[in-house]
Every structure is written in C-alpha cells, then in structure tokens.
Amino acid sequence: DRLEETMAQFTREGISFQQLASKSLLTPSCSLSTLTEEAAEHTLVMLNELSNLMITRYL
C-alpha cells in the first residue's frame, strides 16, 4: 500500500517499519481553526480511527 511504499525509503536505510510506525504522529493536514466545530470534531474522530487502524495493522 502507499504507506508501505513511502516508508520503504527509510526501511532500506535500516530503520524498521514497526519502529517508524510506533514513533509516528498523525495530524490533520488542515488547520482545524477554520472548520466548524462539527467538522473539526469529525476530522479528529476520523484521525483517531485511522490511528487505531494503524496500531492494529502495523503494531
């Protein structure tokens, strides 16, 4: 998948994928301050779901 392809440049240098994943911080790419409260909350809920998925899949 795209994440694994992107991380491959680091794993080729000897950094394990699990080490990278465990030290990663997921953040929204947009400024939440410009969103409505509902949209900001929805964004954070989706980000939390993605984080949980990554933990389940990679760690």
Image (cartoon, grey):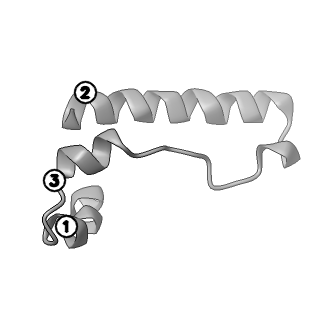
Disc 2 marks which amino acid?
Thr
Quadrant assignment, res 51: top left
Task: Give the CA separation, mark 1 to mark 3.
Answer: 9 Å
Dot 2 or dot 1, earlier in sequence:
1
- Image quarter (top left, top right, bottom left or bottom right) of the C terminus: top left
Between circles 1 and 3, the one closer to the viewer is 3
Disc 3 marks which amino acid?
Ser
Mark seen at residue 8: 1
Dot 2 or dot 3, earlier in sequence:
3
Residue at numbered disc 2: 56
Residue at numbered disc 3: 16
Label 1 secondary element: helix
Q: Are marks 1 and 3 in contact (CB under 8 Å)?
A: no
Q: Are marks 2 and 3 in contact (CB under 8 Å)?
A: no
Coordinates of residue 16 in the picture (x, y in percent) = 15, 53
- Image quarter (top left, top right, bottom left or bottom right) of the N terminus: bottom left
Task: Give the CA separation, mark 2 to mark 1.
Answer: 20 Å
Q: Residue at x 77, y 44 (%)?
A: 32
Q: Residue at x 40, y 46 (%)?
A: 24
Label 3 secondary element: loop
Label 2 secondary element: helix
Local packing at callout 3 (Cα closer than 10 Å; few below 14, some 14-19, many 20+) is: some
Disc 1 marks which amino acid?
Ala
Whether residue 51 is situated above or below residue 28 in the rendered picture:
above
